[in-house]
Amino acid sequence: MNLYMLIGIVLILIILMLFTLKILKSNQENKHSNEEGKIEFKRKLLKVNLPNVVDRLSKKELRELAKEELSTYKALDYKNKLLKDMVKPEWHSWQVSIIIKMYKEDMDIFMPNYENYFPKELVDLSVYSLEYKLHLIFDKYNKEVPITGNKKYLKEHIIWTSKDMSILLLYLIKYKKDENKI
């Protein structure tokens, strides 16, 4: 009986080891997949062509302008709006360009308690869902915003919804720091 018990224990240990190895392999594959997704995200971002007037902004200027945009966003109280009500163009390409330039400069925005300023539907989205939505915004940007546009033109070019701006800001606030941990 002791021999059967010993064989049973050895089999259980072998099964546990195989199970652990399978989990570790799966985690490594997921990590590799996540890294590929982040690399693809950065590639997509690098393909976004910014107007020259935005491309020349310094990091200091970007921070100041971003603070203004964040203040505007907070004042408009989007937290209490439904996403279906946030599809009317209200933001102009100058504002969106500033935020996209921050991505390209690898900058982030610090905003404690960000959950108090964004719709819950967006706050609860996973990083992957937000990245997918960012890809759509980047594609639209490349198609709709001319790199020859000056500041006046960009400020008159109102094609961005509050949902677009929410996604851009939220990702920059919530996930940008994690993005550098590849």
Image (spheres, grey):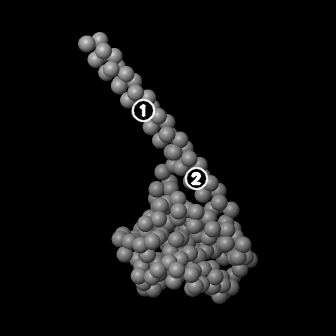
Is any part of residue 52 visible from this angle?
no
Is any part of residue 114 visible from this angle?
yes
Residue 45 versus residue 136: which sits nearer the camera? 136
Question: Which of the two marks, 2 or 1, is nearer to us in this view?
Answer: 1
Q: Which residue is drawn at 66% across and 76% down?
A: 53
Q: How far apart are marks 2 and 1 (CA)?
A: 27 Å
Seen in the picture, residue 49 relative to 38 is either above or below; the reply is below
Count residues near mark 1 (Cα–Cα under 10 Å), then give few for <14, some for 14-19, many for 20+. few
Horizontal and vertical percent position of residue 90? 57, 85
Residue 5 versus residue 165: which sits nearer the camera? 5
Q: Quadrant of residue 21?
A: top left
Rendered image: mark on residue 37: 2
Seen in the picture, residue 21 relative to 123 is either above or below; the reply is above
Task: Give the residue furthest to the left.
Answer: 2
Horizontal and vertical percent position of residue 147? 72, 74
> The residue under label 2 is which amino acid type?
Gly
Q: What element carries label 2?
A: helix
> The residue under label 1 is which amino acid type?
Phe
Q: What element carries label 1?
A: helix
Horizontal and vertical percent position of residue 163? 53, 77
Q: Mark 1 points at which residue?
A: 19
Seen in the picture, residue 98 relative to 44 is either above or below; the reply is below
- In this picture, residue 109 sits left or right of residue 132: left
Horizontal and vertical percent position of residue 181? 48, 51
Count residues near mark 2 (Cα–Cα under 10 Å), then give few for <14, some for 14-19, many for 20+. some
Q: Which residue is drawn at 39% across and 24% down?
A: 14
Q: Earlier in the sequence, mark 2 or mark 1?
A: 1
